[in-house]
Amino acid sequence: MGGLGALGLSWPALLRAAPAGAGDPSFGRARRCVLLFLTGGPPQHDTWDPKPDAPAEIRGELKPIATAVPGIRFSELFPCLARRANRLCVVRSVSHDDTVHSSAGYTMLTGVRHPLANSGSSANIRPTPNDHPHVGALLAFNRPPREGVPVFASLPEVIKDNAINEYPGQGPGFLGARRGPFTIQADTRAGKFLPPAIALPDGMTAERLADRRRSWAGSTGPSPRPTGPRRPPPSTRSRNRPGRS
């Protein structure tokens, strides 16, 4: 949860999987993947790794509970998930040493260490066209949309550090905008999602949009061939000019 890139779904892995096609069992059979990336979320010792046998200054304050898997314990906050632990895979080895939120987020979203990791400030850590792609963009590269449904969707917001600096690694990077996410933004004050960018603006009907498309297609099509009389060849023009023999 939060680090599929760090778990091996990276650009080289997708390139190796692409030629094999969907029938390759090594690529996985999952039909959907939901990546919950929690910025400022709960720590691991209050969720999946309570460390009940560790000293008091290390273990979590919440009580551990047994799960369906012997030896695996969750926080008391997850009784339902604890009963289904045999259907989960808890990975406790994902880690990094970057102390800057934005570049560390890049590492978790792409599986690649940011070139400015541990720079001390996020002021110069911004998205660039040369960034490594988000894991969702890698899937979009490898699997085309089906029935018009985007492969990669992102909600409810574009993640920013202190609501100012956008985290790199949320987009397609060097794969190009075509592999970017279908973004759905949320209005947190109104408690609802905003209409995506595909919705027609007020006053624009489907008929007007179709008319604009026809006009655009006509303006970008091949230039029409001249229909007037053809000019004579140069040799004929020079002989027929007045004042020349």
Image: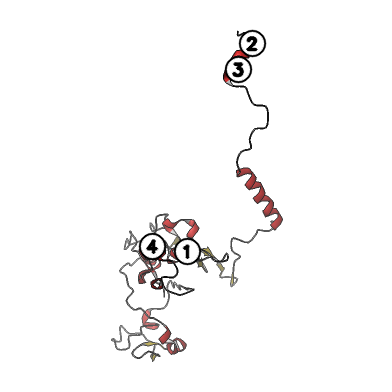
Q: Is residue 128 above or below residue 106?
A: above
- Determine whether the residue tagged by mark 2 lies in a helix, strand or loop: loop
The three-letter code of the residue at mark 1 reads Ala
Q: Nearer the viewer, mark 3 or mark 4?
A: 3
Residue on which the image places disc 3: 236
Find the distance from the CA under tag 3 to the CA under tag 4: 63 Å
Residue on which the image places disc 1: 140
Name which of mark 3 and mark 4 comes first in the sequence.
4
- Determine whether the residue tagged by mark 4 lies in a helix, strand or loop: helix
Name which of mark 2 and mark 4 comes first in the sequence.
4
The three-letter code of the residue at mark 3 reads Thr
Name which of mark 4 and mark 1 comes first in the sequence.
4
The three-letter code of the residue at mark 2 reads Pro
Residue 101 image position (x, y, % from top left): 38, 66
Quadrant containing the C terminus is top right
Q: Which of the 4 quarters of the picture holds residue 83?
A: bottom left
Residue 241 image position (x, y, % from top left): 62, 13
